[in-house]
Image (cartoon, grey):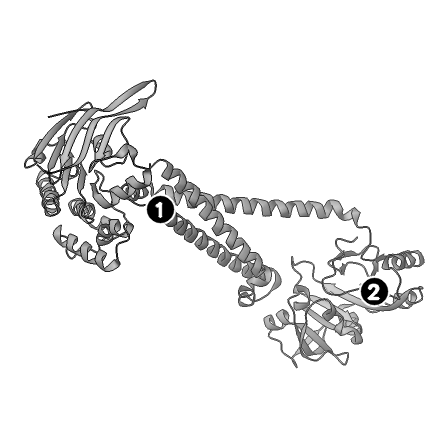
Amino acid sequence: MVVTQSYSIYHSDVVVVPRASLLVEGIPLGGAIPEATSALLEGVSGVAATTPILFVVDTQQLVPRNITIGVPIQNFTMFSQVTQVQLEGNYPTSSDQVVVGGYLASTSDLSVGSMIKESGISLEVSGIISTSNLILGNAVIMPLQTAQSTQGYVGLVSAILVSSAGIQPRVLSQRIESKLPSLVAIDPAQDLSFTNPLTSSVGILSESVDVLSVTLAFLFVAIISSVNLMERKDEFYTMRAIGSSSGSMMKVALAETGLVSLTGFLSGLGLSAVAIAIAFQEYAGIPYLDSLFNTFGVIPLFTAFLAGFVVVGFGMLVGAITITLMLRDMK
Amino acid sequence: MNPPVSRLVSATVTYDDGPSKVVAVDRASLVISQGETVGIIGPSGSGKTTLLNILGTLRPPTSGDVYFQGLSLSDVRVGERRVLRLAKMGFVFQQLRLIPTLSAIENVELPMVLASAPSKLREGRASAFIDAVGLSGKEHRRPNQLSVGEQQRVAVARALVNDPKLVLADEPTSQLDSSAGTEIVELILALSRKTDAAVVISTHDPAISKGLDRVYTMRDGVLSD
């Protein structure tokens, strides 16, 4: 079953997985196919190359922490085609070397040259990759055969990535499935309509939460802005009585509501940063400080700026309306 | 005789109270001359505050005319009335109405700030008025750090700091004991005398009206000698 075809860590024209597999964000979960299937696939007309790949994921965690990825030693650079990766050290040149994700390295106190043990086998960390990708950041990437032997998948892989020799991926996937009916060949143009009920339910839930959050935020801004001014009605009456102009009172109201809204927005942003840091530490093992100062990686700076502008503007608008209504009674 | 500062001509104020109308001020006529001190005595609800509000341009009469320095206020727009209040009138409110977030001296400065007076002039005049009302050393206290009597002194200084031609004090002694009340009235009169301002004080206490040039009585909206 395919949940989504958005492959966040690699690119492939067609991904071949076993029928029982669940493909989430391009990562096949459950099931395995013989590595030798690669040779069969290379015999299919239109297949240019194949890359067998093994994913072993601890699915007990909401965000996987213990991820082992096995790829042929010559394919280690495949991930940098999709996501920005900075390598400290080198990619493995032998079967006893591995590359470790930056977050995993920092939480496990690993550096280039460190030794780790997998199923009793000592492996040397030849490189550490820094990336904003959560999966790669928490992964141990090792040569395929090493992964197979240490993880108990000798001769098996989770998926085979297929690159097309110039034909439409859709056509290629149909050819593969007709030749190897026990496999599922997924291509970017695949009809995923059967996943719509699930994805639309998740989408509706997500959008509902967004709408509710935004509505509540605006409601609170409106209430706080107007109540703040209404509580000072007597002061505004006094200022009006002793000769304050409408313009002066409007300036006071706008300055106050703007300041209140800005304070609220910045407090919200700060609390969000803390919440993001806690969530990342709790579910992804990313150290608090790493994510605390990476808030704008999660909430894009432009989005934050726009949200701040809208919130402060809305607060000031409510202030302007409130003071205008007050002034109407103070002729 | 001094020229009139303010004049009411058969000013009437009525309020809608459901199907019936309440007459708050009933055809009041009054002339207040420059430097004159006038008392309006009457019980609560007799219309004293409404009368002062008419004199202070805070509300127009339902019928009749109000003149300030010969100018009919019915011909004056809202913005011009505001400028008139700022430049030529001083108010001492019954509820004091000091701005709680400002210090005593900042409250006194407020009318000058609204009149866009230069900061040096403001500070100098505000300090002088703080001294004049006997609050030296307490100028930086907030209203809630002052006694009611001291707050009333700040309110008096605020009312007079712009050299008004007409000072309107609505029950300025209502929250004070009789000796403190007498002191406040004497303070208002003393400071007004320096600028030859006319003063109208409303009160329900006849003792307060001693020393005023003229005293009127108000009952059920009717103003009488």
What residue is shown at x 78% (from left), y 71% (from top)?
A71
Does B92 sit above or below residue A139?
above
Q: Quadrant of the C terminus of chain B?
A: top left
Whether residue A242 is visible to the viewer of this picture, yes or no, is no
Disc 1, disc 2: CB below 8 Å?
A: no
Classify residue A168 as left or right of residue B198.
right
Classify residue A116 as left or right of residue B37.
right
**Chain letter behind tag 2:** A
Q: Position of residue B185 (x, y in %)?
A: 11, 41
Residue type at numbered disc 1: Met
What residue is shown at x 82% (from left), y 58% (from top)?
A187
User: What is the secondary structure assignment of the residue under circle 2?
Assistant: strand
Q: Residue furthest top?
A: B19
Query: Closer to the camera: disc 1 or disc 2?
Result: 1
Does A45 sit above or below residue B34?
below
Q: Are marks 1 and 2 on the same chain?
A: yes
Residue position marked by numbered label 1 in the rendering: A249
Q: As rendered, which of A129 and B34 lies closer to the eye?
A: B34
**Chain letter behind tag 1:** A
Residue B212 appears in which quarter of the rendering?
top left
Q: Position of residue A139 (x, y in %)?
A: 69, 68
Residue A180 appears in which quarter of the rendering?
bottom right
Q: Position of residue A326 (x, y in %)?
A: 37, 39
What residue is shown at x 29% (from left), y 36% (from top)?
B76
User: What is the secondary structure assignment of the residue under circle 1?
Assistant: helix
Q: As rendered, which of A257 and B118 lies closer to the eye?
A: B118
Residue A160: which disc?
2
Marks 1 and 2, the one that precedes in the sequence? 2
Q: Position of residue B204 (x, y in %)?
A: 14, 31
Classify residue B199 as left or right of residue A246.
left
Total number of numbered labels? Answer: 2
Whether residue A257 is visible to the viewer of this picture, yes or no, is yes
